[in-house]
Image (cartoon, rainbow, N blue to C red):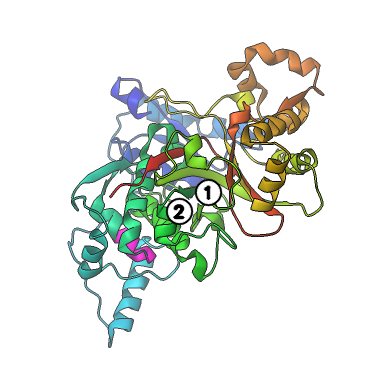
Amino acid sequence: MVELEKRGKPTVALTASGFVHDSRRSARSFGMAALPIAVVPSPFTNQPPEHIHAMVDAALDQVVAGLTGPLGEPAPASGEIIILPDETLAFEGEDLLEAAAAMDRQFLGYGWSDGFPLVPPTRRAVEAMLRGTVRRPDEVICVLEPGFGYATVEKLAVNAVMAGCRPEHLPVLIAATQCLAEPKMYLRNKAMSTGPHAPLILANGPITQQLGLNSKTCALGPGSPSYANTVIGRALRLIMMNVGHTYPGVSDMDTVGSPLKYSLCVAENEEANPWVPYHMEQGFQKDDSTVTVMFVYGICELHDFESRTPERLGDVFCTAATNVAQVGTGLWLIGRRGDPRYKTEEKEHNLLLLCPEHAQLMARAGWDKAVLRKYLYDHARLPFKTLMLNKGPKALQAAHPELQWLWDYPDTPLPIVETPECFDIAVVGGSAGRGAYLYGAGEPVTKLVGR
């Protein structure tokens, strides 16, 4: 809408009442706060055509006014993002604990908190955090959507302090933030969606040992063995909120939410991995320290204590992959995600966190990751009619006009992802046959961890 208005083309967005705050905040972020909207009672999704027609008819006066009138003054936006001019904030109490509690209550009121108690980002604590990197505090690492916030090293350090990080964690957060800003990540889509997009950090290389990142038992937490995992993952979420302005109900319109969004960070168990580590598959050297960021929707257990052949184990994994209620399942049929500004397109990737026991069973049988990917691609299939249950036929026509013949053969089995490479695999966890399948949103991005 902003780009069309700049070109002299009037626009109006039909906006459900629950998304008015989001629409107005987005218009401000994108540089044209007075963009007109026509408010309808509810989203058009899952509605019968006659109900949609009635809502549109009732909103026509708003549409005409928006198309024919001047842009006018920006509409007030409640639930606004709080930005204070003060360089330093002061909080008082009978002792330091009471002062910290007052800060925590106020930050929660401002919307700057993830809901858990925060560590006070005092000047002394931030300066100590900054000693974890050789970069200047005012260096801009990137610009984060959807709020177009400048991610300076100091701002990242502030959020790292609040999350409970240590100085040695800061370089990992810098690299993870760079991953978020890659055009291929299409962050605006993930940050503003109605889905529970959670950024997962996967660490590889020497940095995992240096920081004590947990790759074994209870690697996704909770508990003290996963301390570094927890605070680093938490810090990335706070950075998305307080630097990128991904605030719940303001720009993050997640329908239900997810506990995965609080913190999701893990290291690959390279010691127990019978194959090439994940980062080497991405073109890095074994001694490189890397972080990979991948957005995921949800998680499913990969439990199997019985299988003794890779084929049977692969069949078990396929049952997790063929979940049509997950957005990415069969999404290739109606197109790819992408950011038209950068002409980027993403294939939908899913991530298997394979426990060492399952990985070693497959390796003993001569399977590597490529063989497992191909098996999943060939066998994780569903009938066309099932894959299309929650997808619009017009989208299929636009994305794949050459596949319209499938409507005449609805039982044709189709793969749930576009290519075998859409299955990412990392070895994680301790003993026993339990892994995890994470339903992805787009493609992962991997960066070197520097200083």
Which residue is at a point 76% across and 18% down the rendered structure image?
Answer: 407
Q: Residue 231 or 95: which is nearer the viewer?
A: 231
| Region in magenta | 158-164
| Residue corresponding to mark 1 | 254
Which residue is at a point 50% across and 53% down the rendered structure image?
Answer: 267
Q: Quadrant of residue 318?
A: top right
Residue 161 inside the magenta-drawn segment: yes
Query: The residue under label 2 is which amino acid type?
Result: Pro
Tell me: 282 left or right of 342: right
Q: Which residue lies furthest to the bottom in this view?
A: 94
- Is residue 16 visible to the viewer in this orientation of the structure? no
Do callouts 1 and 2 mark residues in contact (Cβ within 8 Å)? yes
Which residue is at a point 30% across and 54% down the rendered structure image?
Answer: 156
Image coords of residue 246 (percent x, y): 40, 49
Q: Residues within 10 Å of mark 2 (few under 14, many from 20)?
A: some
Image coords of residue 307 (percent x, y): 80, 48
Residue 157 inside the magenta-drawn segment: no
Tell me: 114 left or right of 35: right
